[in-house]
Amino acid sequence: MALSIQAADASHSSDWAFKRLFKLESECRSSTLAAQVQAVGQFPKLFDQFPFPTLVGSAFLKLGDLFCNSPNSLRYHIARVFAASQHHLLHTAYADELLRRVLVVLYSNDPIARVLALRLIGNASAVFAKFPEAQHGVLLRYQSTHPLEVAAAVHATESLLKYSPGFQSVVWETVIARAGDTSVPDSVRAQLICSLRHAAPNLQLSMLLYDHCCFWVEQPRSAIAVKEAALTSWKAVIQPHNELRHIDAQRISRFILHELRSTRCAALALLGTWRPKQGDVAMEADDIKERLVKFIESQLHPPTAGSFDFYCTRLATISLARMEASYTTEAVSQSWAFAEFLANSALQAFSGLSSMASPGTDGRELPTNTLLHDLVYAVMLVVNTASVLRRSEVLLAATATVVNSWRAISSTVGRADNRRHVKRFIETTWAWCTRAGTLHTLSASLEALLDTANCHVFDAIIAIAMRDKLSDPLIARCNQQIESYVGAVSSCATNELSRNAFWNSIAILLAYHLQPHAKPNQPRPTAIPVSAVVKWCVDAAAQDDDVDSSEQHYSSDGPPAHACQTIIYLLAASGNWKALGLLIKTLPSHKFSAEFQEWFDAMSLLAEAEDSLDNADQFLTLIDSALAILHVLDRQQSRHTFQIFVVLIRKELVSLLGDRGNHRAVHPAHPSSALFARLQAKRTHGLIAQVNYVLDAYLSIDPITRSWLEGVLATLNSVDVGHISASVAPPLFTPGPSFFSMPPNPVIDIQTRPNLEAGEAAVVAASGSQLHAIVEGFLQFSKHKLPVSLRGVRVALWLSQRSKQGSDRDLPGCASYNLVARSANSRSSADPACAGDASASGYDDCWNAALAFDAVLDGNYFSCPCAITMPQLASVCSHYDATVSAHIHVSCALIDSAGRAWWVGPHSSYPLAISTTAR
């Protein structure tokens, strides 16, 4: 049996893929060149749609045959196919045969054909690099007098060196000789010199290249393209054992003021690797410093608008800072003055635009990202310069610049495409202030950001509050902001800024008390923010009789759009369900879509259920109503499966522990007590299996939700089934952000080969024999980054007398199958026949005993050979001719770099007939 997945837009089997390959092959042999080119261009799409190793290997061999017997115009397009499908070349097992076909063209008499063959070898270097024939063929082409052929040999060499570093020592002498030959065109010499940068890992060759680069830069007859290439390769070989010398830094600094930007960039990048020492000659160092200062001043006051080069200015400023940090005793640093001037200019330009806000708004959306990016780059230059200088006054000034940039960004309305940029900038600068020892200054400045309406700044502050320790003055300021706003609301003396500060302070305090230092499953000390939310909700509910007045109250005093959802999940994560329920009821739900209205109703019922936890009947009634709404939303493709699973676990946990507390022991012991104990043990084990399934099936569960689920496991494992009347309190229900947004999971699409679903009749297997299978599959990743690194796939295989019951939304059914898959005996996919040794000897013992087979994940594809032994029917059947109906169950898991299995599915079952007469 084999499983294979297909792309989302392909519903055909592997048979259709091979038919498509044969059709493309026939079109490639058309008499019309246009038809051949069109057919060749469709191969990359075929590889992406069906990356089966057999198909890929066969297709590349066919392209290799076509490359040998085609005109150069078609060979060009074939080489482009190899370039577009490099990642699929690793699937072919016939690289040697493919190389033989390419070498036939490489040794032909046509120089253009040889150029195309070299290009193809470079594009296929992932599989050709290990063959000496390919290396020798490329090396011979350096003797050519055709410039295109030499350039193609350089391209092939660079590609081969990525996968075969040892090739550098073979080609070294040839490349050095050609690079130093002035009769070779300058463009070819530049390519040759650039290819030498791969010699950096070799100690001896890197030291030789240092001297050669110095010679090429100083050689008067060298063209500027050659000098740029020498500067680039020179930078690549600068290492601790091969540092840039002071005299060489003096030579390189002459190119700082060159008229070509590429030359300036190469020189400044190389000069940035120089680490000045106290013993360097001061006069020559002053020459370098003078050139750097002159260049920076020319950039800060450009002759024409738009000619400012930030990249080169950054390199020059940091190089100047390193020189000043080494042996300059001046009180005022020129590098810091330049960086500060640049940051102030960017801040002034950014603030000038944000001040153009229209009346009644907090800020204005930036029409482009240019000003924001300029501000971020300039502030980061200030941070880098201060890190190099390491002066206390400079560090404090840099922190002040960071604070001012935060305030400027927070005064604008965030664009959707700026979210990651702004959040990373704030978190990076916060981490820098932590390392620089100026965190107290930055933490105190957060008080000025409490009234921000920028959702990106708000999200970054909440992330910091949940991870790092905030200063006590900031916490006190948040409490003061809440208390003052509550008093201002009663006197109607509020405004937009105080409203933002009020709700932002509530979110910061809720997030801060969710840090890991708090004890799990214990109420957090959030009395002030929670009581403020409750009071506001009560005041809003008092105006329900007047709809207009209620909406006006919400629009003027309610949580702003950027903080509403965050406050909802923070209240849930801290276990304050009463405040959460009141807040949801006060939201203007009639302004939302029907789907959101139903979701708000479900969350309101869930909050009421948690608030009535002491009344078991009322709790179960409310939570069943919430589940009914969530099931309806889930059937509408709203992705609420994870939320349903968590609520089901919560319901069963409360019911299980409540039944234990309500049971009264009878003396002497009554038979009903033993029956009740068995039922309780079965329910406990079933709930443990359900929790384990949820923990194993979702990779991206947030730490808060995962901590609650692990707390449920700890509670269930500590239950003493023997003392069924002992009262155990359920842990506080504290779900995190994953509860409100479905955690993204990779999707594994699978198909069997031989296809078990190919016909109406079940596959027939002989009694006592081994059924061999290959499980193939593809992974479809979501756009969200996974928290783990994946390295392989595990396939669990077992026989059962029943088919798969229920759907993927059936938590008890999924948990029962997951329990079998998790207990599978591991087997190697390299030797699937050994699986038969582990099969149970008895007929009754062979069912629901899984075997696990691991396979390496190759990109998004895997192929896993499997084998499973059929039971012996002779032990249960008295006659020879006997057939038993069974089902093969298959479940898939992803293996991360730590070796943990994540059973994300899918789980499938296929009918199987086991017969004593099968052949």
Image (tube, rainbow, N blue to C red):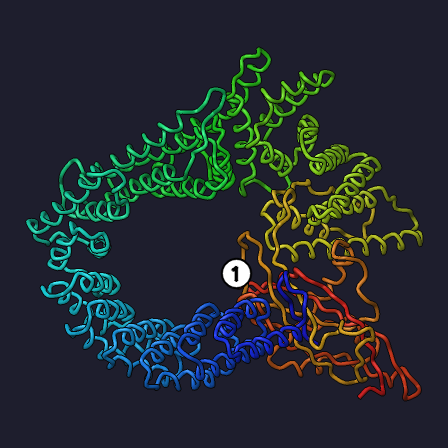
Q: Position of residue 507 (x, y in %)?
A: 55, 32
- Quarter occupied by the N terminus: bottom right
Examine the rendered structure and indicate whether residue 816 appears above or below residue 701. below
Residue 636, image x and y in percent? 74, 46
The amino acid pointed to by label 1 is Ser
Q: Quadrant of residue 77?
A: bottom left
Q: Residue at x 35, y 31 (%)?
A: 404
Q: Residues within 10 Å of mark 1 (few under 14, many from 20)?
A: few
Query: What is the residue that sits farthest to the front in this orientation?
Result: 32
Instruction: Pick whichever, 420 or 185, lies toward us.
Output: 185
**Residue occupying the point 21% across, 45% down:** 321
Q: Secondary structure at mark 1?
A: loop
Judge whether 725 appears above or below 108 on screen: above
Residue 550: where, in percent of width, then height? Answer: 67, 19
Farthest residue to the top: give it. 491
Q: Nearer the viewer, residue 482 or 47?
A: 47
Q: Which quadrant does the C terminus fall into?
A: bottom right
Task: Give the number of marks.
Answer: 1
Q: Is residue 585 shown left or right of residue 656?
A: left
Query: Which residue in the structure is indicated by mark 1?
Result: 789
Question: Residue 183 falls in which quadrant of the image?
Answer: bottom left
Question: Does any portion of residue 420 appear in the rendered image?
Answer: yes
Residue 895 sits in quarter = bottom right
On the question of residue 392 being in view, the answer is no
Is 741 left or right of 493, judged from the image as shown? right
Question: Between residues 305 and 808, which one lies in front from this camera angle?
Answer: 305
Residue 662, horizontal then vertical, whole percent: 85, 41
Q: Residue at x 50, y 76 (%)?
A: 32
